[in-house]
Image (tube, rainbow, N blue to C red):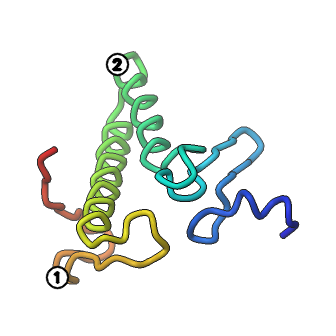
Protein backbone atom coordinates (compact mmCIF):
# COMPACT_ATOMS: atom_id res chain seq x y z
CA UNK A 1 0.00 0.00 0.00
CA UNK A 2 1.35 3.41 -0.88
CA UNK A 3 2.37 5.72 1.94
CA UNK A 4 -0.37 8.26 1.20
CA UNK A 5 -3.02 5.50 1.36
CA UNK A 6 -1.86 4.44 4.85
CA UNK A 7 -3.89 7.35 6.27
CA UNK A 8 -7.05 5.46 5.26
CA UNK A 9 -6.16 2.23 7.10
CA UNK A 10 -8.77 1.44 9.71
CA UNK A 11 -7.92 0.67 13.35
CA UNK A 12 -8.16 -3.08 12.61
CA UNK A 13 -5.85 -2.86 9.59
CA UNK A 14 -8.71 -2.85 7.08
CA UNK A 15 -9.57 0.05 4.83
CA UNK A 16 -11.24 3.08 6.41
CA UNK A 17 -12.26 4.34 2.96
CA UNK A 18 -14.48 2.01 0.98
CA UNK A 19 -15.10 2.93 -2.64
CA UNK A 20 -17.07 0.93 -5.14
CA UNK A 21 -18.61 2.09 -8.40
CA UNK A 22 -21.60 3.74 -6.71
CA UNK A 23 -20.58 3.65 -3.04
CA UNK A 24 -18.21 5.77 -0.99
CA UNK A 25 -18.06 5.18 2.76
CA UNK A 26 -15.54 6.90 4.98
CA UNK A 27 -15.28 4.99 8.26
CA UNK A 28 -13.89 6.45 11.46
CA UNK A 29 -10.09 6.33 11.42
CA UNK A 30 -8.59 6.18 14.89
CA UNK A 31 -10.00 6.71 18.34
CA UNK A 32 -12.43 9.68 18.20
CA UNK A 33 -11.26 10.77 21.67
CA UNK A 34 -7.75 11.17 20.26
CA UNK A 35 -8.24 12.19 16.60
CA UNK A 36 -11.79 13.55 16.61
CA UNK A 37 -14.66 12.29 14.49
CA UNK A 38 -13.40 11.85 10.91
CA UNK A 39 -15.77 9.25 9.55
CA UNK A 40 -18.84 7.18 10.26
CA UNK A 41 -19.26 4.02 12.32
CA UNK A 42 -20.54 0.71 10.98
CA UNK A 43 -23.64 1.38 13.05
CA UNK A 44 -24.25 4.57 11.05
CA UNK A 45 -24.19 2.65 7.77
CA UNK A 46 -26.67 0.10 9.13
CA UNK A 47 -28.95 2.93 10.32
CA UNK A 48 -28.97 4.48 6.82
CA UNK A 49 -30.01 1.12 5.36
CA UNK A 50 -32.74 0.66 7.96
CA UNK A 51 -34.15 4.13 7.25
CA UNK A 52 -34.17 3.49 3.49
CA UNK A 53 -36.00 0.17 3.86
CA UNK A 54 -38.46 1.75 6.31
CA UNK A 55 -39.15 4.34 3.63
CA UNK A 56 -39.96 1.51 1.21
CA UNK A 57 -42.19 -0.13 3.82
CA UNK A 58 -44.18 3.09 4.21
CA UNK A 59 -45.11 3.11 0.52
CA UNK A 60 -46.27 0.70 -2.18
CA UNK A 61 -42.90 -1.09 -2.03
CA UNK A 62 -43.75 -2.73 1.29
CA UNK A 63 -43.10 -6.48 1.33
CA UNK A 64 -42.23 -9.42 3.54
CA UNK A 65 -38.61 -9.47 2.33
CA UNK A 66 -38.12 -5.87 3.49
CA UNK A 67 -39.56 -6.87 6.86
CA UNK A 68 -37.06 -9.75 7.15
CA UNK A 69 -34.18 -7.48 6.09
CA UNK A 70 -35.21 -4.92 8.74
CA UNK A 71 -35.26 -7.65 11.37
CA UNK A 72 -31.73 -8.80 10.54
CA UNK A 73 -30.34 -5.27 10.28
CA UNK A 74 -31.84 -4.54 13.70
CA UNK A 75 -30.19 -7.69 15.05
CA UNK A 76 -26.88 -6.48 13.62
CA UNK A 77 -27.37 -3.12 15.34
CA UNK A 78 -28.03 -4.85 18.66
CA UNK A 79 -24.92 -7.01 18.28
CA UNK A 80 -22.76 -3.93 17.67
CA UNK A 81 -24.30 -2.11 20.64
CA UNK A 82 -23.47 -5.15 22.77
CA UNK A 83 -19.91 -5.20 21.39
CA UNK A 84 -19.45 -1.52 22.28
CA UNK A 85 -20.91 -2.07 25.75
CA UNK A 86 -18.61 -5.05 26.43
CA UNK A 87 -15.56 -3.16 25.16
CA UNK A 88 -16.41 -0.18 27.40
CA UNK A 89 -17.01 -2.40 30.44
CA UNK A 90 -13.70 -4.21 29.83
CA UNK A 91 -11.76 -0.97 29.37
CA UNK A 92 -10.61 -1.69 25.81
CA UNK A 93 -12.83 0.69 23.84
CA UNK A 94 -10.72 2.94 21.60
CA UNK A 95 -7.80 0.50 21.63
CA UNK A 96 -6.54 -2.32 19.41
CA UNK A 97 -7.04 -4.79 22.27
CA UNK A 98 -9.59 -7.58 21.96
CA UNK A 99 -12.51 -7.83 24.34
CA UNK A 100 -14.04 -10.97 25.82
CA UNK A 101 -17.24 -11.88 24.03
CA UNK A 102 -20.30 -13.52 25.53
CA UNK A 103 -19.82 -17.13 26.68
CA UNK A 104 -20.05 -19.55 23.75
CA UNK A 105 -23.32 -21.09 24.99
CA UNK A 106 -25.01 -17.74 24.18
CA UNK A 107 -23.63 -17.51 20.63
CA UNK A 108 -25.97 -20.01 18.98
CA UNK A 109 -25.53 -22.01 15.81
CA UNK A 110 -25.15 -20.72 12.24
CA UNK A 111 -28.51 -19.49 10.99
CA UNK A 112 -29.97 -19.32 14.51
CA UNK A 113 -31.42 -16.02 15.72
CA UNK A 114 -29.45 -14.78 18.71
CA UNK A 115 -31.00 -13.19 21.75
CA UNK A 116 -28.89 -10.38 23.13
CA UNK A 117 -29.31 -8.86 26.54
CA UNK A 118 -31.14 -5.54 26.53
CA UNK A 119 -29.27 -2.69 28.17
CA UNK A 120 -30.90 0.40 29.52
CA UNK A 121 -29.58 3.70 28.18
Q: Which residue is tagged 2?
A: 58
Relative vertical location of residue 111 with respect to residue 46 in this rendering, above or below: below
Q: Position of residue 78 (x, y in %)?
A: 27, 53
- Residue pictured at 13% horizontal, 54% vertical: 118
Q: Dot 2, crowdedness within 10 Å: few (<14), some or many (≥20)? A: few
Secondary structure at badge 1 equals: helix
Look at the image and tell me in which quarter the N terminus lies. bottom right
Whether pointer 2 and pointer 1 mark residues with C-beta atoms closer than 8 Å, the reply is: no
Q: Quadrant of residue 114?
A: bottom left
Viewer-side residue, 31 vs 49: 31
Q: Dot 1, crowdedness within 10 Å: few (<14), some or many (≥20)? A: few
Viewer-side residue, 77 vs 62: 77
Look at the image and tell me in which quarter the C terminus lies. top left
Q: Position of residue 99 (x, y in %)?
A: 34, 76
Left or right: residue 84 compared with residue 53: left
Left or right: residue 107 compared with residue 99: left
Q: Which mark is residue 115?
A: none
Of the image marks 2 and 1, the number of the one nearer the N terminus: 2
Left or right: residue 17 compared with residue 50: right
Left or right: residue 45 compared with residue 27: left
Residue furthest to the bottom in view is 104
Q: CA distance from mark 2 to mark 1?
A: 38 Å
Relative vertical location of residue 68 with respect to residue 16 in this rendering, above or below: above
Q: Quadrant of residue 63?
A: top left
- Residue pictured at 57% horizontal, 66% vertical: 11
Secondary structure at badge 2 equals: loop
- Residue pictured at 60% horizontal, 55% vertical: 29
- Residue pictured at 11% horizontal, 47% vertical: 120
Q: Which residue is tagged 1?
A: 105
Amino acid sequence: MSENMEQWRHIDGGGALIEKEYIRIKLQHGNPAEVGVNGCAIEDVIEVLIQKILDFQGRKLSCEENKVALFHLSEAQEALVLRRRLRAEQGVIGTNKQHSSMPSENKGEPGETLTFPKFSS
